[in-house]
Amino acid sequence: MSPALGQDAPMDDLIRAWERIETWLRERQCTRAVSALHPPASEEAIQSLQAAIPYPLHPHLVQWLRIHDGAPGCDALIWPGGYVPYGTEGLKAGPEYMKEGLEEFLDQFPEYRDDPEDCPAVPWADPLWLPIAGTNTGESLLIDHRPGDTYGNIIEVDYESNEVTAVRWKDLGEMIGLMAESLESGSPMPYSRQNSRVPQLDEGPPRYLNWKLEKIQD
């Protein structure tokens, strides 16, 4: 078993935070998104995913998959920004997607291939980034699997923004914990230096959670 699959101790906070999120949604009759999430991934599915990924999966991702094995389409809009998490089968395509994205970047900025220090642009792909969620408009959330201080960072890639890549949260556990805190307190969820995500319950029908992007006031 990969070391990442055996690290259970730090995962309790992630589990409890997600339980708080689902409780908050159910208490407000916002159940369609929760119901759309897939059941937990089996251990066989997780092991199959790990076998397809050329590096140990981050333990937070493994724990998340043990709660929900992704979701279909746009019915499970719970994560901020309209992101729908991928399941074990969808995650398997991540390394190839990153490989193709990096080649596309290097073709556009060949100086990065020869001398990365002088590259004028920020890469939008890396062999050790794994896409874990996407929107219906093409944005992606990724987990940074590079060793060091960036390990576990949640990165957002938005090709329409001036900021092609940006670290949004320290790791998946922090993201889910901040979601729970924001829902329970009604306070904005940290997102970037300029903006926050503010939870709003739209009446629908059906009711659904909307994380509105708001500018931080000076």
Image (spheres, grey):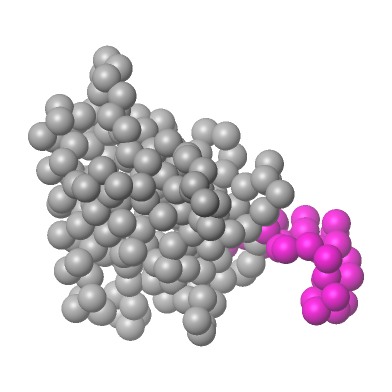
Disc count in the image?
Answer: 0
- Using residue 88 as the reference point, say whether residue 100 is left or right of it: right
Judge whether residue 110 is colored magenta.
yes
Q: Quadrant of residue 108?
A: bottom right
Residue 14 is situated, as x and y percent measured from the top left of the image, at 23, 63
Residue depicted at 83% across the width and 70% down the height: 119
Residue depicted at 46% across the width and 53% down the height: 191
Judge whether residue 198 is colored magenta.
no
As displayed, is residue 149 above or below residue 206?
below
**Can the viewer see residue 142?**
no
Residue 102 vs residue 135, the one in the foreground: 135
Residue depicted at 40% across the width and 67% down the height: 171
Q: Quadrant of residue 156?
A: bottom right
Residue 69 is situated, as x and y percent measured from the top left of the image, at 30, 50
As displayed, is residue 180 above or below residue 4?
above
Residue placed furthest toward the front:
218
Please provide the residue range marked out in magenta: 95-124
- Using residue 188 as the reference point, say whether residue 54 is left or right of it: right
Residue depicted at 32% across the width and 33% down the height: 200
Residue 75 is situated, as x and y percent measured from the top left of the image, at 35, 30
**Can the viewer see residue 7?**
yes
As displayed, is residue 61 above or below residue 76?
below
Q: Quadrant of the N terminus?
A: bottom left
Residue 165 vs residue 93, the one in the foreground: 165
Residue 130 vs residue 96, the one in the foreground: 130
Q: Quadrant of residue 61?
A: bottom left
Q: Main secondary structure of the magenta part?
A: helix
- Using residue 194 as the reference point, say whether residue 42 is left or right of it: left
- Using residue 158 as the reference point, say whether residue 187 is left or right of it: left
